[in-house]
């Protein structure tokens, strides 16, 4: 700080310009590296399920910065001119994010030149001028009545029903939950007409148990019931588990269905989280799209055991499959690898 304070104005401005130029060069190199890491899926080896998770948890980018850099890095792999524009200080990250969806091989050079040294608002205007959108429809909206005094307010259900607004006025959706402290969270969602009707009916039926009709309390009970059902379906969780049925034929031994007792034990042992561990000891720990994975591929083991099965998230499960079976073989199962299919890479046939 003292060194900076000792500079005269001309030196300060000169060094400031040099630092900006250096930062632009570093930013361009960073985007190039991020794009290559993304293309090689190296984030999986760092125990991360996605490039975004890697940028936030390993590189410690803020969420917004991570999103912009990933978007810019992917665009730059398709249009390398972006890197030179960033390196030269012609484009900032926000500009790249705005331009990326519109860039093609034919218009890339012209569009980058048109956006050179422009602010985000100027680029938005530039894009709007190139592809004018239709005017928003005329509409009338009822103005909310003034709030009643606190002493005369009527108790209303604590659920917000959203009114559809014109597309031009739609703002990004807020986070589904927001911490309020003291182990309390504000939860906000949009309900359609049928869901709202069901919620109001449930609220009326439960007034004997929840006299104030608090929707939060009702949803808490509903979530607990649904969670119990999903746990039972996913890993055979049960308060009174039944003993495994004895094998009645040799064909049953080769069944891909994992016995309930094994699923239950593996899920409890692994904590319901992905067990993939990076070289530095960092564990993935993802709870989303978690699957039972045979340590030795099912096509080779043809058996189930507690020690032979572990939990893996879909990303790391498929990474194992690519290593075991190869990219070409995995491409044949691309449609089966979606989040809703329960795809298990260990069940692939050679």
Image (tube, rainbow, N blue to C red):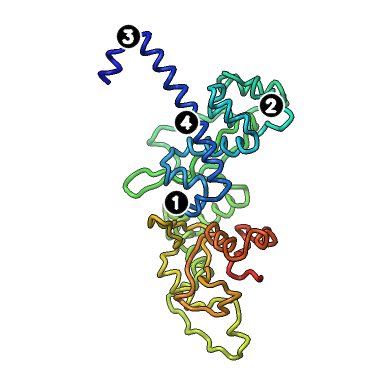
Front position in the image: 85 or 133: 85
User: Left of 53 or right of it: where is 71?
Assistant: right
Q: Which comes before the other along the chain, label 2 or label 1?
A: 2
Where does label 3 land, which residue?
8
The image shows residue 147 at horizontal and vertical percentages of 46, 31
Q: CA distance from mark 4 to mark 2?
A: 42 Å
The image shows residue 22 at horizontal and vertical percentages of 45, 25
Q: What kind of element bears circle 2?
A: loop
Above or below: residue 113 compared with residue 223: above
Label 4, residues with CA under 10 Å away: few <14, some 14-19, many ≥20: some
Residue at the spot 49% in from the left edge and 67% down from the top edge: 231
Q: CA distance from mark 4 to mark 1?
A: 49 Å
Where does label 1 land, which residue?
216
Q: What kind of element bears circle 4?
A: helix
Quadrant into which the N terminus falls: top left
Where does label 2 land, which residue?
136
Q: What kind of element bears circle 1?
A: helix
Quadrant into which the C terminus falls: bottom right
> Which of label 4 and label 1 is nearer to you?
4
Q: Which comes before the other along the chain, label 4 or label 1?
A: 4
Front position in the image: 237 or 191: 237
Q: Are marks 3 and 1 in contact (CB under 8 Å)?
A: no
Q: Which comes before the other along the chain, label 3 or label 1?
A: 3
């Amino acid at each position: 700080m003292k060194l900076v304070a000792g500079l005269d104005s001309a030196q300060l401005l000169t060094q400031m310009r040099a630092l900006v130029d250096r930062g632009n060069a570093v930013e361009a190199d960073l985007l190039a590296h991020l794009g290559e890491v993304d293309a090689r899926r190296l984030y999986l080896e760092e125990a991360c399920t996605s490039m975004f998770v890697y940028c936030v948890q390993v590189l410690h980018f803020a969420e917004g910065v991570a999103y912009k850099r990933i978007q810019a890095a992917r665009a730059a792999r398709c249009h390398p001119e972006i890197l030179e524009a960033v390196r030269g200080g012609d484009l900032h990250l926000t500009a790249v994010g705005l331009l990326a969806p519109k860039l093609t091989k034919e218009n890339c050079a012209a569009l980058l030149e048109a956006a050179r040294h422009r602010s985000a608002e100027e680029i938005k205007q530039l894009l709007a001028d190139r592809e004018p959108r239709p005017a928003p429809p005329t509409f009338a909206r009822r103005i909310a009545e003034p709030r009643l005094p606190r002493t005369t307010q009527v108790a209303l259900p604590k659920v917000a029903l959203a009114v559809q607004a014109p597309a031009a006025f739609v703002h990004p959706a807020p986070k589904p939950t927001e911490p309020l402290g003291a182990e309390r969270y504000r939860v906000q969602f949009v309900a359609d007409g049928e869901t709202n009707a069901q919620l109001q009916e449930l609220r009326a039926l439960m007034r004997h148990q929840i006299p104030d009709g608090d929707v939060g309390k009702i949803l808490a009970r509903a979530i607990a019931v649904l969670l119990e059902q999903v746990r039972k379906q996913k890993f055979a969780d049960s308060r009174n588990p039944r003993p495994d049925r004895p094998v009645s034929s040799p064909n049953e031994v080769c069944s891909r269905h994992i016995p309930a007792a094994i699923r239950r034990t593996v899920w409890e042992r692994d904590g319901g989280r992905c067990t993939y561990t990076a070289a530095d000891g960092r564990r993935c720990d993802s709870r989303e799209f978690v699957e039972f994975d045979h340590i030795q591929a099912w096509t080779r083991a043809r058996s189930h055991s507690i020690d032979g099965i572990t939990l893996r998230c879909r990303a790391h499960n498929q990474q194992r499959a690519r290593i075991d079976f190869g990219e070409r073989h995995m491409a044949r199962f691309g449609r089966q690898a979606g989040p809703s299919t329960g795809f298990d890479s260990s069940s692939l046939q050679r």
